[in-house]
Amino acid sequence: LSVRHSSRRWKICNFDVLQRYNSDWMRPNGRELGKMLDSGVKLLVFAGEADFICNWQGLWAWASRVPWRGRRQFRAAVQGPWRSSNGTAIGTRVSSGGLAFVRVSGAGHLVPRDQPLAAEQLFDEFLSGAVFKP
């Protein structure tokens, strides 16, 4: 998939960019993220429900085990529907403290491509802090 916008060409996978980040591949980051959460940095983890590369079950298991002071409360928080502005269920969401986890319905590995309106709403909610409210 490629899209042409003015004089620039966007590709779904740019292997030149991938090669430049190849040294940062599959490094554990749970402890660092836990320290960031403890210092007040907010973290959003999201996944498409049909993503088999970074599946939501594995990401949920990882997010619920990040070592930070709010881990117990996060794991005990109730997971509920995540809704669009018109009230339609577009996924599930759980949040506690500065950590939020969102599973996006009808999306695979590339949430913004598969569900652009949901991705835009998620980005807006992250910037406004709404995604972190119980």
Image: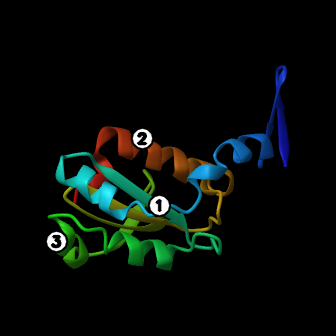
* Secondary-structure class at tag 2: helix
- Would you say 34 lies left or right of 48 here? left
* Secondary-structure class at tag 1: strand
Query: Which residue: 64% across, 71% down?
Result: 53
Name the amino acid, label 3: Gln
Residue 128 percent across, percent down from the top left: 32, 39
Cα gap from disc 3 to disc 1, whole angstroms: 19 Å
Crowd around label 3: few <14 · some 14–19 · many ≥20 (10 Å)? few
Mark linked to residue 46: 1
Residue 72 percent across, percent down from the top left: 17, 75
Name the amino acid, label 1: Phe
Q: Mark 3 points at which residue?
A: 73
Q: Name the residue under label 2.
A: 124
Looking at the rendered image, the quarter that the C terminus falls into is bottom left
Q: In this view, does 16 lie above or below 46?
A: above
Pointers 3 and 1 in contact (CB under 8 A)? no
Task: Return the disc, 2 or 1, that comes first in the chain's sequence.
Answer: 1
Mark linked to residue 127: none
* Residue 58 visible within the image: yes
Query: Which residue: 56% across, 72% down?
Result: 49
- Most extreme residue toward the top is 7
* Residue 14 visible within the image: no
Of 35 and 104, the residue lying toward us: 35
Q: In this view, does 78 lie above or below 32?
A: below
Of 17 and 132, the residue lying toward us: 17
Query: Which residue: 42% across, 63% down?
Result: 102
Quadrant of residue 33 within the rendered picture: bottom left
